[in-house]
Image (cartoon, rainbow, N blue to C red):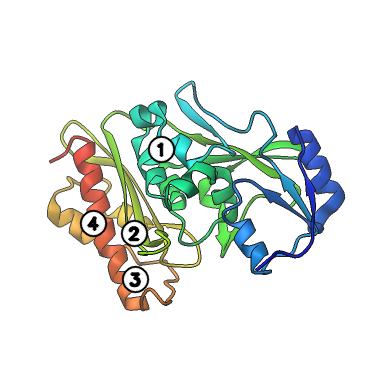
Amino acid sequence: MYPAAFEYHSPTSVRDALGLLGRLGDDAKLLAGGHSLIPMMKLRLAQPKHVIDLRKVPGLTGIKEDGGTIVIGGMTTHWQMESSSLLKSKCPILAETAAMIGDPAVRNLGTIGGSLAHADPAADQPATVLALGVEFVCEGPKGRRTVKVDDWFKGLMSTAVGEDEILVEMRVPAWPAGSGGAYLKFPHPASRFAVVGVAAMVTLDKEGKCTKASVGITGAGTKAIRAKGVEAGLVGKKLDAATIEAAAQKAAEGIDVQADLQGSVEYKSHLCRVFAKRAITEAVKRAGGK
């Protein structure tokens, strides 16, 4: 099927793109990698009169370190993240999550900013950015502002980015020594989206006790969410198999689990618990635990 007619714009600066957004308003949509917007346009689920392509805007791609914080441009592709030596050495969970997205064609064009602004409830990176405590930098007509990840995902395909703003970068905080992370998922066999995906980050002290834990879950509900009950079951304890098992049993708590063609509420809740246990176990190993 073909999309409805639209006017194409290719700005060459963030300022120009914001000017177009301000002038065109609700009639315009931003185009990043295009893997979300273009299929919706072809099905006529979205019919913008104007498409603003960000691919020629300089300064929106790249991965760099800034005083211990990793800064990722909003137009950075999943492939660039998957292959980044900086991420592999300093934040491997991000590179590993990127490698699980779709297929090579998707990863070569799809962007981290486009994905996180679109906020598909079955996308992979939302779980990982929640676990890492990422901050989002949005730029609008009044300048830049920073949004904490816990305030980012508002609902089904709804985020904190304003209609007159562009998500320009993500800032990944440094985790202390003794930290490890893992993202694991049960993938849809065709799309590779997460039926359920769980990202876990833990920090262990010299005695093997957990001093910090963060767990993000995607796929199960209408938005990615922190599993705070699981986190509470980990912090302050030595993370042996029994402790991890008990904490993982709380994985579906607080999630508005949605039944769909991939499974019932009970089944997807079960997957939350299973993959929470697996992700935490792997994160503990990477943090130096047994």
The quarter of the picture where residue 194 lies is bottom left
Q: Residue at x 38, y 56 (%)?
A: 228
Query: If you read the primary sequence from the N terminus, does the residue marked by circle 3 or circle 1 appear first?
Result: 1
What is the distance, in whole Å, between disc 3 and disc 1 at their CAs? Answer: 28 Å
| Disc 1, SS | helix
Mark number displayed over residue 277: 4
Residue at position x 63%, y 46% in the image: 32
Between the residue at mark 1 and the residue at mark 4, the CA separation in whole angstroms equals 24 Å
Categorize mark 4 by other alpha carbons within 10 Å: few (<14), some (14-19), many (20+).
many
Which quadrant, please, contains the N terminus?
bottom right
Residue mark closest to the camera, 1 vs 2: 1
Q: What amino acid is found at the position of numbered circle 4 in the picture?
A: Lys
Q: Badge 3: how crowded within 10 Å, few (<14), some, or many (20+)?
A: many
The residue beneath circle 2 is: 229
Identify the residue shown where x is 56% and y is 63%.
155
Q: Position of residue 38 (x, y in %)?
A: 63, 57
Task: Classify residue 254 as left or right of residue 150.
Answer: left
Residue type of the residue flagged with mark 3: Lys
Q: Which residue is mark 1?
A: 82
Nearer the viewer's eye, disc 3 or disc 1?
1
Given residues 174 and 21, the one toward you in this image is 21
Whole-angstrom CA distance, mark 4 to mark 2, is 13 Å
